[in-house]
Structures are given as structure tokens and as C-alpha cells.
Amino acid sequence: MNNQKFSIIDRIKSFKYAFNGMKLFFVNDHNGRIHLFAAVIAIGLSFYLKISSLEWIAILSVISAVFVAEMLNAAIEKLADVVSPAYHPKIKVVKDLAAAAVLVAAFLAVAVGFMVFIPKLFL
């Protein structure tokens, strides 16, 4: 058990590190920028179509899920490259699984987007 006392300075530093991680993600990760572009489009469309509160919850939830999955994927890939710079079949499996998590989140986001936007745009 950690007996370190609560420190507001340490909590503030942890936010600083998290925001730095987000900055690194959007600056250095091509897929992160693609997801950001898609999120901006979805949010803009949501405002334009005046979606309901529950639809906002669905849209923002899947956007967050995609970002979280992509950030974890990027972190896993970077860590795997440090652990095993050369090709290793088990590292490939780890990277493929992390990429699959992003794919599942993206498919869910597309499905939710269709359910929310298609009826408002075409029906």
C-alpha cells in the first residue's frame, strides 16, 4: 500500500502528462488525425441536424471509444517496438489484436452514425 499523502500538485501534473499524451497522439499519429477529422464531421452534422440528447450521448460515446481504442493501440505499438524492435510473431499478434480493437470501435461508430444520421438526412 502506498502511504504517500495526497498532493494537488501531483494531480495537476498528471493532467499535464495526459494532455501532453493527447497532443502527441494528434500530432504524430496519422490514424488519430483521421479519427479527429471524422469526429469533427460527426459533431458538426449533429449540431446541424439538432439531434436529441440521447443521440448526442451515443455519438459522443462512440467517438470517445474510437479515440480510446486508437490511443491504446498506438501505445501498445510503441511499447512493442521498444520491447522487440525486430519482427517477432508474438508481438505481431499483440499489435494485430490492438488494431482489431480499433476496428471494432470504428465499426460501432459507423453503425451508430448510420442509425442517428441516415433517418434525419434521407427520411
Image: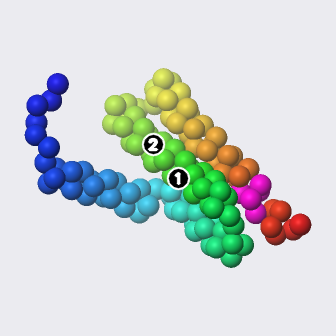
Can you identify the residue that label 2 sits on? 72
Please, is residue 112 above or below residue 81 in the view? below
Q: CA distance from mark 2 to mark 1?
A: 12 Å
Question: Mark 1 sits on what residue?
Answer: 64
> Magenta span has 114?
yes
Report the amino acid beneath label 2: Leu
**Residue 24 seen in render:** no
Which residue is at 33% across, 58% downward? Answer: 19
Residue pictured at 60% horizontal, 37% vertical: 100
On the image, which quarter does residue 21 sit in? bottom left
Segment tinted magenta in the rendering: 113-117
The residue tagged with tag 1: helix, strand or loop?
helix
The part of the image, by quadrant, that contains residue 4 is: top left
Q: Nearer the viewer, residue 37 or 29?
A: 37
Quick one: label 2 or label 1, which is nearer the N terminus? 1
Picture coordinates of residue 84, whole percent (x, y): 37, 30
* Position of residue 84 in the picture relative to residue 97 (left or right): left
* Residue at 64% across, 73% down: 47
Q: Residue furthest front?
A: 53
